[in-house]
């Protein structure tokens, strides 16, 4: 009889853990649909970005806007920046300079690189406008000691006289939480009419 009771407790603990995992999945799925339904638009230069309601603006200046989650303790931020100039410097060179300056070493087997606008932006006008794009997503080590999850988009239209750099940076585990919302924010981005 004692053996049955011990197994019963084991099964009860397992059932409680599974119920907790299912509840968490339901909450995350609801947050995803909430993003689509309840996002608000931020105008950043010529860009119109749908932003989740749980992102709070932590910094806003000309050519720069930064978001953090203030409702949690996530080690995460998203940064959108327009940098004037450098219209003749290839985006790959700008990206390499950023990686070197921040002392980033991406995990070679776990990095995604994308350069096709139609894979990054859903809006056809946005795809046609930003024909020069590069996206790098993955885990990296920064300054030999800190593990980070980084998703960086660089894109430009030379007539605008500069380039956009958008990044989502977090600890490795938190990147899995906010990363998809950052990606959706940029994929849903549209150009404001002149």
Image (spheres, helix red, strand yellow):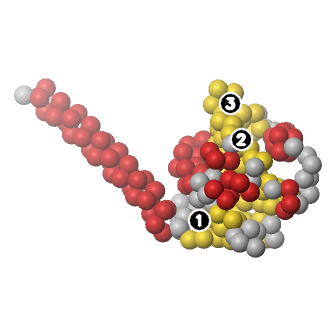
**Residue 34 locus on image (x, y percent):** 44, 63
Q: Residue furthest left?
A: 1
Mark 1 or mark 3, which is nearer the start of the sequence? 1
Measured in 3D between alpha carbons, the distance from the residue under mark 3 to the one under mark 1, in whole angstroms, is: 30 Å
User: Is residue 76 at all visible to an observer of this figure?
Assistant: no
Position of 41 relative to 148 (above/below) = below
Q: Secondary structure at mark 2?
A: loop
The quadrant of the picture occupied by the C terminus is bottom right
| Residue beneath disc 3 | 107
Q: Nearer the viewer, residue 85 or 175?
A: 85
Q: Residue at x 76, y 69 (%)?
A: 45
Mark 2 or mark 1, which is nearer the start of the sequence? 1
| Residue beneath disc 1 | 50
Measured in 3D between alpha carbons, the distance from the residue under mark 2 to the one under mark 3, in whole angstroms, is: 19 Å
| Residue beneath disc 2 | 115
Q: Nearer the viewer, residue 44 or 123?
A: 123
Query: Which image quadrant for residue 67?
Result: bottom right
Q: Residues within 10 Å of mark 1 (few under 14, many from 20)?
A: many
Q: Secondary structure at mark 1?
A: strand
Q: Nearer the viewer, residue 32 or 145?
A: 32
């Amino acid at each position: 009889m004692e053996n049955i009771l011990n197994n019963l407790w084991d099964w009860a603990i397992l059932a409680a853990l599974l119920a907790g995992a299912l509840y968490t999945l339901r909450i995350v799925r609801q947050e995803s649909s909430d993003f689509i339904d309840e996002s608000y638009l931020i105008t950043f230069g010529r860009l119109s970005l749908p932003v989740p309601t749980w992102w709070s603006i932590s910094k806003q200046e000309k050519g720069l806007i930064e978001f953090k989650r203030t409702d949690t303790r996530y080690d995460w931020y998203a940064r959108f920046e327009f940098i004037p100039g450098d219209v003749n410097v290839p985006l790959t060179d700008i990206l390499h300079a950023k990686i070197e300056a921040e002392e980033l070493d991406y995990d070679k087997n776990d990095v995604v690189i994308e350069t096709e606008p139609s894979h990054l932006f859903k809006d056809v006008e946005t795809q046609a406008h930003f024909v020069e794009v590069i996206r790098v997503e993955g885990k990296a080590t920064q300054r030999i000691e800190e593990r980070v999850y980084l998703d960086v988009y660089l894109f430009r239209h030379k007539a605008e006289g500069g380039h956009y750099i958008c990044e989502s940076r977090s600890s490795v585990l938190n990147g899995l939480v906010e990363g998809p919302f950052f990606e959706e924010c940029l994929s849903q981005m549209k150009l404001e009419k002149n």
